[in-house]
Amino acid sequence: MSVMFGGTVILKNNIIFMHNIIKSVEKETVTGFPVVPTIVAMLRSMHNLDKYNINSLRYVTNTGADLPEILYE
């Protein structure tokens, strides 16, 4: 989809270090972020997430599985 709209895809090979992922979102001014429930859970458990400027994000999509209700809270 990104090719159709002239976007850039950023691939990371290690989601264990979520701070590195969020730093990339900030640095590269990422606009779309596809996630799986595991990543949502990891993001919710991060401390100091508000120190990153991720205002470039326009949408986050969920793929792979339904989000458990607990992640909505």
Image (cartoon, helix red, strand yellow):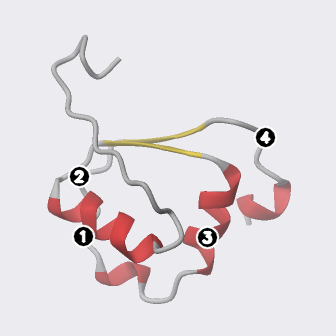
Q: Where residue 7 sits in the image (x, y, percent)?
A: 20, 27
The kind of residue tagged 4 is: Asp
Q: Nearer the viewer, mark 4 or mark 1?
A: 4
Q: Which residue is drawn at the image coordinates 37% and 64% (left, top)?
A: 21
Q: Where residue 25 sits in the image (x, y, percent)?
A: 28, 58
Contact check, label 2 and label 1, Cβ < 8 Å: yes
| Chain-order first, disc 4 or disc 1 | 1
The kind of residue tagged 1 is: Asn
Q: Which element is circle 3 on?
A: helix
Q: Which residue is mark 4?
A: 66
Q: Nearer the viewer, mark 3 or mark 1?
A: 3
Q: Nearer the viewer, mark 2 or mark 3?
A: 3
Q: Where residue 47 sits in the image (x, y, percent)?
A: 50, 88
Q: Is residue 34 above or below residue 45?
A: above
Q: Which residue is mark 1?
A: 53
Give the CA separation, mark 3 to mark 1: 18 Å
| Chain-order first, disc 2 or disc 4 | 2
Left or right: residue 64 versus residue 61 is right
Left or right: residue 41 versus residue 68 is left
Q: Which residue is mark 2?
A: 56
Q: Quadrant of residue 44?
A: bottom right
The kind of residue tagged 2 is: Ser
